[in-house]
Amino acid sequence: MKILILTQYYPPETGAPQNRLHELAVRLKNEGNHIEVLTAMPNYPKMEIFKEYIGLKSKREEIDGISVHRSSIYVSKDGGIIKRLLNYFSFVWSGWKYGTRNFKKNQFDFLLVESPPLFLGFTAVFLSRKLKTKMIFNVSDLWPESAEKLDLVKNKFFLNLAYKLEAWCYKNAALITGQTQGIVKDIDKRFPTLKTFWLPNGVDLSYYNPDQVQSNWRVENDYSDSDILLFYGGIIGHAQGLEVILKAAKEVQNHPELKFILMGDGPVKNELLELSKDMNLNNVRFFDPVPKSIMPKVVKAVDATIVPLRNLPLFEGAIPSKIFENAAMKNPVILGVKGEAKDLFADEGQCALPFEPENHQELASLLVKIANGQIQLKELGENGRNYVDQKFNRNKIAASFNNELKKLVSI
């Protein structure tokens, strides 16, 4: 099969969508398919075009044997709504223009588009029609529902238009794929006649293999063997509710062995840095994001990873991608997420310690038990690797998706 992946985010950018889509592309290619990617000039997360791409309107390159086509995008460090819309719609337009000029009718069997941003659905629908190819709409976050419930978008007129755009995209898709079972169930409930498929995130167990990773990260960053390192790595944004970690850190200051590491970047990082300073926290350190190649060494060096989300019904169907990588590295997860993630990793997989989202006292209580030796982390870590191998192995996920696409080719 010949598949074109359309996404605003792709390596060399770092982040969960970028890694997930590239890993899927590589595995679909290994299944014998021809894969190409249409994406934007890399700029995320700093909202700056990467140095080697500055001044280019378009570029074609190859990453791991996959042809990657890039078109221009407007970027700005201003997080206001107008600038964000300009960012989204600049690629909506440039992606359409590049696609119509460089691809031919019947060149692809499928066009798989990543949402959010939902607006890229405009490009996907019209480009799939132009190229005479079936569209697959991959939903990694239910937008605009998430934007509404996070109070990021309050204008009712704009929200109504966005919900209509969402429905229009779904109805033009040959298949809607959802990253979580919660997303799939939500779409099935609202659009019962449309075809859906669970396409979960997963992990490369050969890359995230603790037996193959040597790490000096702990020593290099002046931590001792007796320190208990509690790690958060990823987007420092509105959805994560990372204040819970700082508040818990304040509660456990009488346990000096408990050290907190927040690694990443995002829209609320400066606010958290100020909050940490105001709270006079001497047990919390912030680190800049690191390349994917360094992450296994960081995870190998820490004792557990904290994965929080805000306490909203919206997130009961969310599974943060960092859970998979930490589980594969036998690193226990301290999970502040209700719903699907808790059901899978705490209850079924027995590899995560749950606490109520945004409840810093409950989190602090768990951490004190770890410090006092009342909770043994090693067994949780072993359970984690076994569990993701069974249910979230990227090779198995890609093979299953490949079989689903084969069924659609002849329809």
Image (cartoon, rainbow, N blue to C red):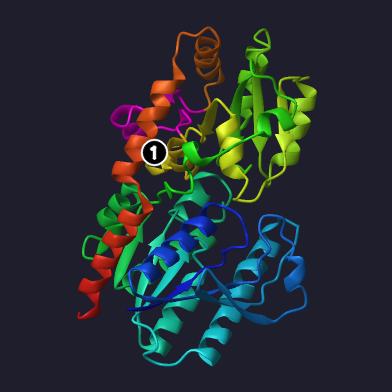
Residue 347 within the magenta-colored segment of the rendering: yes
Q: Residues within 10 Å of mark 1 (few under 14, many from 20)?
A: some
Specify whether residue 149 is in view.
yes
Whether residue 162 is situated above or below residue 293 in the rendered picture? below
Q: What residue range appears in magenta?
A: 330-357
Q: Quadrant of residue 354?
A: top left
Residue at which label 1 appears: 316
Q: Position of residue 359 (x, y in %)?
A: 52, 22
Looking at the picture, how far across and down is residue 171, in whole percent?
Answer: 32, 71
Which residue occupies 30% across, 44% down? 391
Residue sitting at 40 percent across and 82 percent down?
128
| Rendered location of residue 109, percent (x, y) | 33, 81
Where is the C terminus found, in terms of image quarters? bottom left
Q: Quadrant of the N terminus?
A: bottom left
Residue 130 is inside the magenta segment: no
Question: In this picture, is 300 found above or below 86?
Answer: above
| Label 1 residue SS | helix
| Kind of residue at badge 1 | Glu
The front one of 337 and 322 is 322
Q: Is residue 272 visible?
A: no
